[in-house]
Amino acid sequence: MASDAPNPLGAYLRDRRTRLDPAAFGFTGGRRRTPGLRREEVASRANISTTWYTWLEQGRGGAPSADVLDRIAKGLMLTEPEREHLYMLGLGHPPEARYQLVDGISPRLQRVLDGMVLSPAIIKTAMWDVVGWNRAATVLLTDYAKLPREDRNILRLMFGSDRVRAKNADFDSMARFVVGAFRADVARAGASSSAEVTSLVAALCRISPMFEALWEDNNVVSHGEGVKRIHHPKAGLLAMEFSSFAVEGRPELGMIIYNPASPADAARLRTLLDAHGD
């Protein structure tokens, strides 16, 4: 007998089920009393029994497993935010992170970067590949557009480029910080044991004994905020405060925004940007 207690999971499943077009999934037949897919059709798409799916909608049978929720999410064609909500209702916690390779960012996100005219800003992946940047970042940090796609990696630049290393004041402490933050990021994204991360770490160990030593230390830090001191060939030494932000709905992406640490740094940065032109 169904419980009289509220059943948010069942209500959510019914709502998602009734929004789907049966014809789009090859289901035909006579008139339907309600819109959307039938329970047995969702169960078939999810490769679970109709009884078990019916119990979930009715609030019976206990908590479903993560595997069952993933099958249902696939059967109902849920988006990633909808799948996360399904997990929160069914298990009380979000699903384990799924790492996704990223090739670029949306035009809307690029416009967010471009709107920060006086603040260098980048978008990076969990592997610290730079996939978005604004003009101020090009002027102060690196002209990423001139680099091959595979070289737009912050770790490769830091540990493989003497020019980039020379620009970073306090390089040793910054390198330790970056490696610890990278380790935390790939773990959070569910990518620690991925082939991509394994290959990147191996390549960095080959080109930099310093990276290898820091990686073996197993330090983990949060990449929340801090100060980066940059030796610029035209502007001199600039102290830039940085803050890191998650990109909503894109756990594999992070935004880093740099702002001058003092009025003097702000004046030098403005002069540098003005001199660079468009």
Image (cartoon, rainbow, N blue to C red):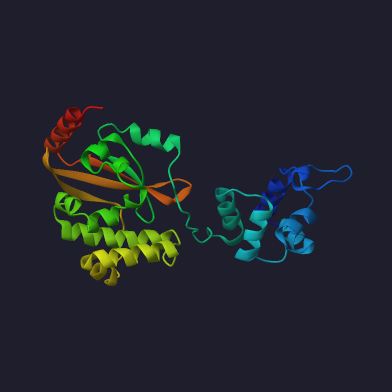
Q: For the point 81% across and 48% down, which residue is it?
A: 27
Q: Report the number of discs.
A: 0
Figure check: 265 above or below 172:
above
Figure check: 237 above or below 177:
above
Determine the image quadrant of residue 271. top left
Q: For the point 66% across and 60% down, which residue is it?
A: 71
Q: For the point 64% across and 55% down, which residue is it?
A: 73
Q: Position of residue 118 (x, y in %)?
A: 25, 33
Q: Position of residue 152 (x, y in %)?
A: 32, 49
Q: Quadrant of the N terminus?
A: bottom right
Figure check: 99 above or below 124:
below
Q: Is residue 4 visible?
A: no
Foreground residue, 149 or 75? 149
Q: Quadrant of the C terminus?
A: top left
Residue at the farthest bottom position? 216
Q: Position of residue 235 (x, y in %)?
A: 12, 38
Q: For the point 14% across and 39% down, which residue is it?
A: 262
Q: Is residue 192 left or right of residue 257?
A: right
Residue at the farthest right position? 30
Q: Position of residue 10 (x, y in %)?
A: 69, 54
Foreground residue, 130 or 123? 130
Determine the image quadrant of residue 162. bottom left
Q: Is residue 26 visible?
A: yes
Foreground residue, 32 or 213? 213
